[in-house]
Image: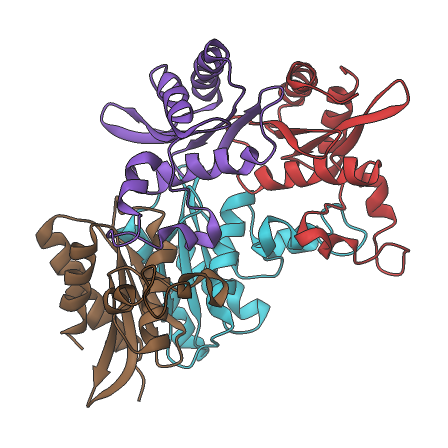
Chain colours: A cyan, B red, C purple, D brown
Amino acid sequence: MSVNLEDARRVTTAAEAFATEIGQPMNIAVVDAGGNLVSHVRQDDAWIGSVKISISKAWTSRAFNISTKDLGDNAQPTQQFFGIHTTNDGNVAIFAGGIPLVRDGVVVGAIGVSGGSGEQDHSVAEAGAAAL
Amino acid sequence: MSVNLEDARRVTTAAEAFATEIGQPMNIAVVDAGGNLVSHVRQDDAWIGSVKISISKAWTSRAFNISTKDLGDNAQPTQQFFGIHTTNDGNVAIFAGGIPLVRDGVVVGAIGVSGGSGEQDHSVAEAGAAAL
Amino acid sequence: MSVNLEDARRVTTAAEAFATEIGQPMNIAVVDAGGNLVSHVRQDDAWIGSVKISISKAWTSRAFNISTKDLGDNAQPTQQFFGIHTTNDGNVAIFAGGIPLVRDGVVVGAIGVSGGSGEQDHSVAEAGAAAL
Amino acid sequence: MSVNLEDARRVTTAAEAFATEIGQPMNIAVVDAGGNLVSHVRQDDAWIGSVKISISKAWTSRAFNISTKDLGDNAQPTQQFFGIHTTNDGNVAIFAGGIPLVRDGVVVGAIGVSGGSGEQDHSVAEAGAAAL
């Protein structure tokens, strides 16, 4: 009921292909159903500051079964989850790029992408998630 | 003058029952008068990202003798406590779900609930606190 | 394939009973197959410094599929894993009290106990694990 | 002068093949000349506690241009570097499994392997490093 390494690679390959297509090198991380890292890749010239962000986005998406984009909408000042970004030892990412991986209606892991604009990160994560 | 394990269990059982009633699995934590964890339960399928948040909410409520909902109102940008969420090594939660446990007018501990919307978390915490 | 809350409670109840029998109050934590906390209880008068240790012991036992007692033997100076206790942000416990929970030959979680001597912690964890 | 993602994949593939050959699933991480993560894979059933350790081993090997096995020999009690494992926010690994990646006599990155005995981890890292 959780993604394995083969799943993670298929998801990552699709995400990498899309990142290459839009010309924006990315960090791409995949976590399993327990939130634990299965794989990470940093494409050449992708930001080194995005290594941990990609992992945090993947973890966050699985931890709360939600895209980090949607979580971010609820985590702005005056919104119901404002402040969530400093919980869990700072591992909660509240900006676009993390998406749950769903199989037969069950969240079995998540992908996290970081390296470009929020819109780019989210679209690369979607391309990856679609390959599950 | 502090909750003990028996108290924590009574509070938790009431909170669990209400969470089940509203159909939202929750993490439920109880801390004592010293702010130290007495008990935690994660109901099946509750968010794994909410484990530490439930504990942080309970700690925060006892640490400042206030619900995290009310603390949150004072912790928004431009308000008097904005920034408090990054103090205490990131253990301060400023969104709904934490409530002090009061006996004879004295705060003897706190309950923290995380797993749903802010409104849901707060109502489950209230159900728990009422059972003290 | 992972322990649920009902499993965790059965394990915890057995551990508590044994702790009471030997007259040593304990912290008892259970994590699932992903290493995430399912439940924690601190018996009355158990050490507050053992809250996090019990959780770390449970996590460590699942993280490496080994009792923390056995891991500790390999983590002494000059042994093959010396230094492992400072990895994983300090969450690795290398002294007795953590035991994997095994079902049909598969590790499905772990129990961590802290509050007494190493021998006491280990025996209480064994009593809990036997109830799975 | 630094490994790129293609290099990291070649190194990782060789390490994975050797891990599979010896029947011990592993976490395999590669960092570049800057010590920043290029890639990580966790083979199915490899320890979840070894995710961060594999990354720490790779970072440590590049950080000091030495295998973590050799660093470990110098980091035992009474040796010249005893205590180094708690520096750098706990990211220094002092047990076998990390090896510098060298090209034309220059360290261009490192590989870190975690998931088995110290001897196994080191041999898998060697298999990976040989493929650079």
Viewer-proximal residue among C43 and D14: C43
> Does C77 sit above or below residue B34?
below
Q: As drawn, which residue projects farthest toward the left?
A: D21
Q: Is residue C5 left or right of residue D7?
A: right
Q: As drawn, which residue projects farthest toward the front?
A: D78
- Find residue B124 and report its horizontal and vertical position in percent: 72, 25
Viewer-proximal residue among D100 and A32: D100
Do we see residue C31 in this rendering? yes
Viewer-proximal residue among A112 and C132: C132
- Find residue A59 and report its horizontal and vertical position in percent: 49, 51
Which residue is located at x 24 percent, y 77 percent? D101
Viewer-proximal residue among D118 and A104: D118
* Quadrant occupied by the N terminus of chain C: top left
> Does C4 sit above or below residue D75?
above
- Find residue D41 and report its horizontal and vertical position in percent: 30, 58
Q: Is residue D13 left or right of residue A103?
A: left
> Does A105 sit above or below residue B89?
above
Task: Please count the marks in the image.
Answer: 0
* Quadrant occupied by the C terminus of chain C: top left
- Find residue A115 and report its horizontal and vertical position in percent: 50, 72
Q: Is residue B19 left or right of residue D39?
A: right
Which residue is located at x 49 percent, y 33 percent? C54
Which quadrant of the view contains residue B31?
top right
Which quadrant of the view contains residue D104?
bottom left
Which residue is located at x 72 percent, y 31 percent? B120
Do we see residue A131 in this rendering? no
